[in-house]
Amino acid sequence: MNRAKRLWFVALAIALALIACDRDKDAAAPPPSNSVAAGAPPKEPLKLPPDDAPPPIVDGDRAMQYVKEIVKLGPRPLGSANHKKVEDYITSHLKGDEVEDDSFTADTPEGKFPVRNIVAKYPGTKDGVIIIASHYDTNYPLRNTSYVGANDGASSSGLLLELANHLRGKQRDGYSIWLVWDDAEEAIKPDGSGGLPNEMPFSEDSLYGITHLAEKWQADGTLKKVKAFILTDMIGDADLNVEKDTNSTPWLQEVVSEASKRLGYQSHFFGRQMEVGDDHLPFVKRGVPSVDFIDFNYGYNNVFWHTPQDTVDKISPQSLQIVGGVVLETVRILDKMDPVPPK
Ligand SMILES: [Zn+2]
């Protein structure tokens, strides 16, 4: 995860008041009415299909085991031997799956680096693709510390390996699902928030892997098939509170919100609103409906983020299970939406 702009001022207070207000409204009146500002065109309420199937169950303990094993490899910044080890670790768990390798050389402020995105594809019966993504590299400026990114990079990458177990060998009655372990998400220079002379704005020096993939898929026409881009990042915190990110697509957040309610996990979602700069931006920019599952309050005031304290003892199998379940339920609702709304 790179950076988030916090909206800790009047907007937040208003947003929280509105969220609280919305919840009261939901409790009072089952079909939520989409009230609109005077003069704005009335918005069609999003109709979400019911789902009678048993709730998807993700094995949080097995996901946690993957997280621990990734962390055990040590810091995995771009260009390191450990980075190669984690690439091998991920691909070794995808044997027999259809895997697309997207390897290229990134030109960064610290020189050229090999970058590798790993894409595992699970075909469905419907025409279209849902992407579930996680970056797996660790922060480059912290490469000479003990920083292992247990939450930032490993938690979501381990969860995706467990989602692969869930998807493997089953006939999907829905869209194809592509799991993406993207690389070089982290900034190479310090990200411009500390005011130091060698820093760079994060927008000019990050998201190398996922940007390459979005550009490639735009050029070859693949992007048109992508119905939704679901990003997971920093989702292992035992105190799980997924943000309502203002860069994400509102209708897709409505689907996530409904999915969380269906599983009884709504208290972990969307209690705070902020703008998050993350791997979804290249897809947002290209008009793909996108949502970021991120908890950007890791320890009070996010104190563990990008520090050597981002260690496995802060991660909980239950948080992995909650996020995994809500991701799969979101996919299941999307599977029944045809066509899905545009961004
Ligand atoms: Zn990060």
Image (cartoon, rainbow, N blue to C red):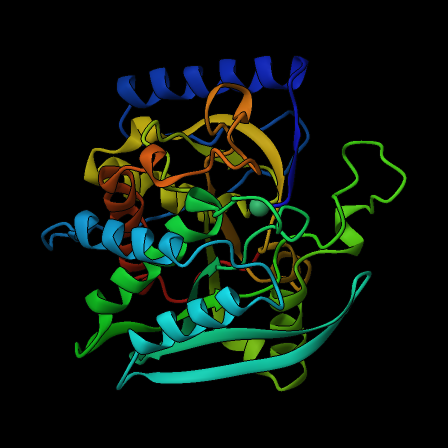
Q: Is residue 290 above or below residue 218?
A: above
Return the x and y of residue 265 as percentages of the image width and height: 25, 33
Front residue of 146 and 105: 146
Asked whether the viewer can see residue 328, the reply is yes
With 88 as the anchor, is 264 left or right in this view?
left
Return the x and y of residue 143 as percentages of the image width and height: 61, 51
Residue under the image location 55 percent in, 28 percent down: 273
Say which quarter of the image contains residue 41: top right
- Toward the right, the furthest residue is 197
Residue under the image location 51 percent in, 17 percent down: 16
Front residue of 75 and 168: 75
Return the x and y of residue 209 as percentages of the image width and height: 62, 68
With 144 as the anchor, is 153 left or right in this view?
left
Q: Is residue 268 above or below residue 61?
A: above
**Number of marks in picture:** 0
Return the x and y of residue 271 as percentages of the image width and height: 43, 24
Front residue of 156 and 45: 156
With 242 as the anchor, is 224 left or right in this view?
right
- The C terminus is located in which quarter? bottom right
Residue under the image location 31 percent in, 51 percent down: 68
Residue under the image location 25 percent in, 61 percent down: 162
Front residue of 289 and 161: 161
Asked whether the viewer can see residue 333, the reply is no
